[in-house]
Amino acid sequence: MTDQPTPTEVSIRGRFVGMSILGSAVVLVIFLENLRVIAWLPYVLHILGVALALAIAVPMLFFRRPVDHARRT
């Protein structure tokens, strides 16, 4: 009889936080392109890549909740 760790998943609030991080980065990129800020255009892919990494990492680190599955014996 080993104690298995309780499985966890990202909560709904965490999913919203992740999508808001990614959406904010997309809005920032669109804003920079519309203003024709030439200095930032080479960094657009970097900005989106970092936003994607944060949109995955932040909810996984801070918005986890245990999942209660009914066990069949």
Image: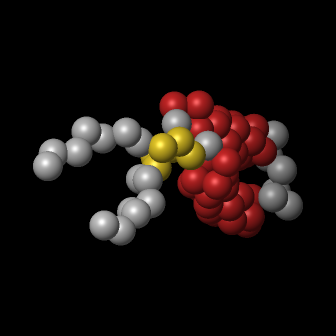
| Residue 51 position in % (x across, y down) | 66, 54
Q: How is the image coloured?
A: secondary structure
The front one of 25 and 6 is 6
User: The N terminus appears in which quarter of the rendering?
Assistant: bottom left
Picture residue at 23% right of the left edge, 45% below the top = 71
In the depicted structure, whether residue 30 falls above or below residue 39: above
Name the residue at 14% across, 49% down. 73
Q: Which residue is farthest left? A: 73
Asked where in the image residue 31 lies, by quadrant, the reply is top right
Residue 17 x, y percent position in the rendering: 64, 37
Judging depth in this view, the residue of 56 and 43 nearest the camera is: 56
Residue at screen point 74% across, 64% down: 43
Quadrant of the image occupied by residue 5: bottom left
* In-front residue for pair 71/58: 71
Asked if residue 22 can be seen in this view, the reply is: no
Question: For residue 57, what is the image quadrant?
Answer: bottom right
